[in-house]
Image (tube, rainbow, N blue to C red):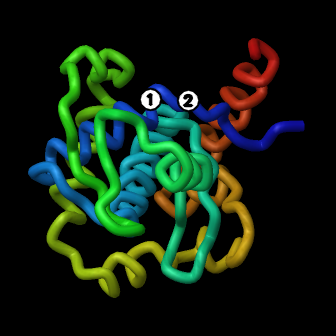
Amino acid sequence: MNTNFLYNRDKAVAAIVFVLREMDGTIGFHKLSKILYFADQKHLVEFGRPITGDTYQAMNFGPVPHTTYNLVKRETPPQFSKHGAYNLLLEEYDDAIFEELSETDMEFLSQSVIENKDLTFQQLVDKSHKEAWTKNEGQFINIIDIAKEAGADENMLNYISQNIKNQTFAA
């Protein structure tokens, strides 16, 4: 049985463009990863679903959105470009791209940018190396562990599990 949400590439690209816009057009992938992680984590606890559906891998420097990382590494969409190996630059985009994101998606992404944009690399590592990361170090992080770490109660954890089952059934 699937234990994670389905990844939505279009939402992931829209989320990256949204974050890049909020960060004045440039961001390193490490900071982007953490901004996405904390936005997904809080959205998961509040609404029972993450923003992009990506699966996070517990890497040395914190959770990394696995499929989004591979997307950026292998095929950079036209709305942004790579500068060096790990920096992204915003290119031309149409505001219609944000139709992929709900109001709450954008609200939580914006909140995560505000909370994390000024943190150093090490501060982001320390902030993201909590229970979910520790429990799954070197592996994919269970979505339930991400929600528990952020304070989801038993009812929300059951709701999240049911949402995953429903999404898998509908796919």
- Image point (35%, 31%), residue name: 14
Q: Residue at (22%, 54%) from the top-left corner?
A: 113
Q: Which residue shows up at 47% across the image and 50% down it?
A: 72
Q: Is residue 86 above or below residue 73?
A: below
Residue 4 lies in what quarter of the image?
top right
Amino acid type for the residue under numbered disc 2? Asn
Q: Residue 137 location in percent, x, y?
A: 68, 77
Residue 69 locus on image (x, y percent): 53, 55
Snapshot quadrant of residue 54: top right
Task: Name above or below for residue 128 compared with residue 122.
Answer: above
Q: Quadrant of the N terminus?
A: top right
- Label number found at residue 11: 1
- Outermost right residue: 1
Alpha carbon of mark 2 to alpha carbon of mark 1: how far? 5 Å
Marks 2 & 1, CB-CB < 8 Å contact:
yes
What residue lies at 60% left-to-right and 57% top-to-bottom? 56
* Left or right of residue 71: residue 87: left
Residue 64 position in % (x across, y down): 53, 63
Compare residues 166 and 18 and report the one nearer the observer.
18
Q: Which residue is mark 2?
A: 8
Q: Position of residue 97 (x, y in %)?
A: 30, 21
The residue under label 1 is which amino acid type?
Lys
In this rendered view, identify the residue nearer to me: 69 or 155. 69
Q: Quadrant of residue 46?
A: top left
